[in-house]
Image (tube, helix red, strand yellow):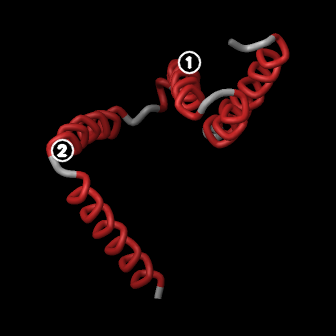
Amino acid sequence: MFKVDHWILLVSIVLFAALLQTSTGYGFSIIGTPFLFLLSPAQSAVQINIILSLCISVFMIYKIRHEVDTPLLGRLILGSLLGQLLFKKISQRVFQIFTYVILLFTGLYLVITSL
């Protein structure tokens, strides 16, 4: 269990990371995760980070709900669900090869179009 000084440090880290997230739109995980690793085991730090990041995003989405591209959000949700199903069905090796091929072709495309 955390001592009082750990709680103060934890709250300070989360406050600073949340301030960065709300002012720039990203950064909570970039700042929060490495410092949370110092206070708790990696698995706990990642879980804390995900829960807090989700809470911040839920509060922020309410403020910017009129600026959300709803059709794009629907496609992202559908793609995420299909991706989860695909991820559960294929082997890890096939997933790695698929990821490598996509990254290779994306890199080649970026190099060719920048010439």
Residue at 57% across, 23% down? 48
SS state under label 1: helix
Nearer to us: label 2 or label 1 = 2
Residue 98 image point, x, y percent: 25, 62
Identify residue type, mark 2: Leu
Vertical position of residue 15 compared to residue 114: above or below? above
As drawn, the residue found furthest toward the bottom would be 115
Question: Dividing the picture into quarters, in which one does residue 70 lie?
Answer: top left
Q: Residues within 10 Å of mark 1 (few under 14, many from 20)?
A: few
Q: Nearer the viewer, residue 69 or 24?
A: 24
Vertical position of residue 85 compared to residue 40: above or below? below
Question: Which residue was labeled with disc 2?
Answer: 86
Residue at 72% across, 28% down? 39
Q: Residues within 10 Å of mark 2 (few under 14, many from 20)?
A: few
As drawn, the residue found furthest toward the right would be 5
Q: Is residue 42 left or right of residue 77?
A: right
Vertical position of residue 3 compared to residue 15: above or below? above
Q: Nearer the viewer, residue 91 or 60?
A: 91
Question: Which residue was labeled with disc 1?
Answer: 59
Residue 81 image point, x, y percent: 24, 35
Quadrant of the frame with the N terminus: top right
Please say if the residues under marks 2 and 1 sit with CB atoms less than 8 Å apart: no
